[in-house]
Amino acid sequence: MSSSSAALNLRVGDDVLHTNPQTLTVAQRRQMASLALLRLAAIEDGLLSAEDPPPQDGVLSEAAAGAIDCWLDQHVQVPEPDEQACRRFHAAHPARYAQGEQVLARHILFAVTDGVDIQALRQRAEQVLLAVRADTDAFEAQARALSNCPTAKEGGRLGWLRADDCAPEFARELFAQDAPVAHVGVLPRLVHSRHGLHIVDVQSRQAGVSLPFEMVKDAVSQALRQQSFATALRQTCALLAARHGVEGADIDAAGSPLLQ
């Protein structure tokens, strides 16, 4: 089961995982709770000692990580996608399998540093996001005033970027979009990266060259396996949550709890 985000603690069964979950993102809370549920499942199956310490701040013991891998191998089965399904997926997602796409972008970075109030930082970033979406002409001034990136003095300009130029979590938001018309303008949500929270304005795009199925069939097959695994994992964690109880995280939310 899941509780509201107002819970004082992040708890799975009898284990308190975090005493102030409001400092964590929804995805972080879901990931920590899901790992704790899988650890309990491994203990129930005798794959892990009941004396194994509960995870602290989402960090499992080495024994628990290995036991969870074994448990998943035994309980989460992923079917191998057939060629027809792979071809349909490739045809439906041409941008994902294109090479050489570039975007002209600028950003405002709200850096996450030691001791920063994450909740307050996110609220401030959301306010600025709304402001620049309403008035794109203000983006450069906001970047100069607020961005924690050396590009601030350039109005946040990042220049032309390829996917390989960016951190993977940043590139996922800018590239490989599946919409018929890829987004140009201020992205409607904050982009989370290892550096912090970004407001991103995509000013222009240069389309890449679509690669034929034969060149990317292994990548397509892997993408479908990952989708199947994520779905099976969400269902498994929902069942485990109903058995053990979860407070402070929404296990049923969309998105894989372990592949964020």
Image (tube, rainbow, N blue to C red):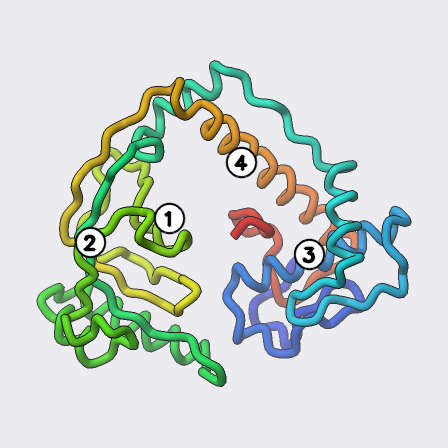
* Residues at marks 4 and 3, CA–CA distance in whole angstroms: 19 Å
Residue that label 1 marks: 172
Viewer-proximal residue among 33 and 103: 103
- Which callout, 3 or 1, points at the residue further toward the start of the chain? 3
The reply to whether discs 2 and 4 touch (Cβ–Cβ < 8 Å) is: no
Q: Residue at x 65, y 71 (%)?
A: 57
Say what amino acid the circle numbered 1 marks.
Arg
- Which callout, 2 or 4, points at the residue further toward the start of the chain? 2
* Residues at marks 1 and 4, CA–CA distance in whole angstroms: 16 Å
**Would you place residue 122 above or below residue 44 in this image?**
below
Q: Residue at x 41, y 52 (%)?
A: 168
Q: Position of residue 158 (x, y in %)?
A: 21, 61
Residue that label 2 marks: 202
* Residues at marks 3 and 1, CA–CA distance in whole angstroms: 24 Å
Q: Residue at x 48, y 19 (%)?
A: 85
Residue that label 4 marks: 227
Q: Residue at x 78, y 52 (%)?
A: 243
Q: Position of residue 92 (x, y in %)?
A: 35, 26
Q: Count neighbours of disc 1 (C-alpha within 10 A) and say few if under 14, some if 14 to 19, many if 20 or more.
A: some
Name the front one of labels 3 and 1. Answer: 1
